[in-house]
Amino acid sequence: MAVLIGLFAIGEVIEQLVAVDATPIPDATVKGAIPRLPLLDLWPLRWSLIRGTAVGLAVGGLAGAGATVSSFVSYGLEKQVSKTPELFGKGHEGGLVASESSVNGSTGGAMVHLLCLGIPGSAATAVMMGAFLLHGIQPGPLLFTKQPVEVYTIIAGMIIVNFVMILWALWLHSRSPRS
């Protein structure tokens, strides 16, 4: 299934690369203008972001429920609490933010099962469990007492990677000609 999806994606990428866009890109830089921080765009959507992350952590904490389930649950919840539910299904920012933040939150929830119980909570953590076992790390209840250095290295790595991704996204956004 993943290979078929990838094959369709490759065709779409090639089509987008060869498509000629005749519309000129407007110059977004004005001399003397202060660049706008893209994180400020999220401020009006902060509650959607918080709800989505909380749903992702909760659903990711359920064994077997992965990112897809948390995405659908978060989107449905956001649609229920929204003042404008008729805009959902048409690219509403609240639905997009809630859905994507729940996907990111479910990763941390799935890691709890892997590290504490030795049970993979999603397909990604099942692959990680295999990698851990190859490197001599046995996930489960005794992991924190027998190999605390490895556990805290994994946790610190996840935190560092999140900050690196934020900085990378901000840098890419600042270099974007359409920002």
Image (cartoon, rainbow, N blue to C red):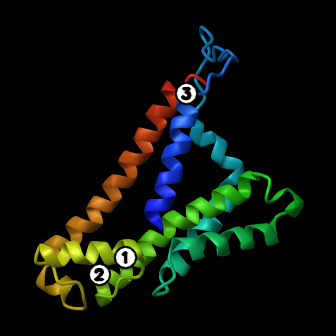
Identified at 23% across, 84% down, the residue is 139
> How far from the left and from the top, in percent, is residue 64?
47, 85
Which residue is at the front of the view, 33 or 97?
97
Residue identified by numbered label 3: 18
Up/down of 2 relative to 46, above or below: below
- Horizontal side of residue 168 vs 85, given as left or right: left
Per the image, label 3 sits on a secondary structure element best described as helix
The three-letter amino acid code for the residue at tag 2 is Leu
| Residue 141 image-quadrant placement | bottom left
Q: Quadrant of the C terminus?
A: top right
The three-letter amino acid code for the residue at tag 1 is Met
Residue identified by numbered label 2: 115
Residue 73: numbered disc? none
- Horizontal side of residue 75 vs 145, given as left or right: right
Residue 111: numbered disc? 1
> How far from the left and from the top, in percent, is residue 129?
26, 78
Identified at 67% across, 16% down, the residue is 26
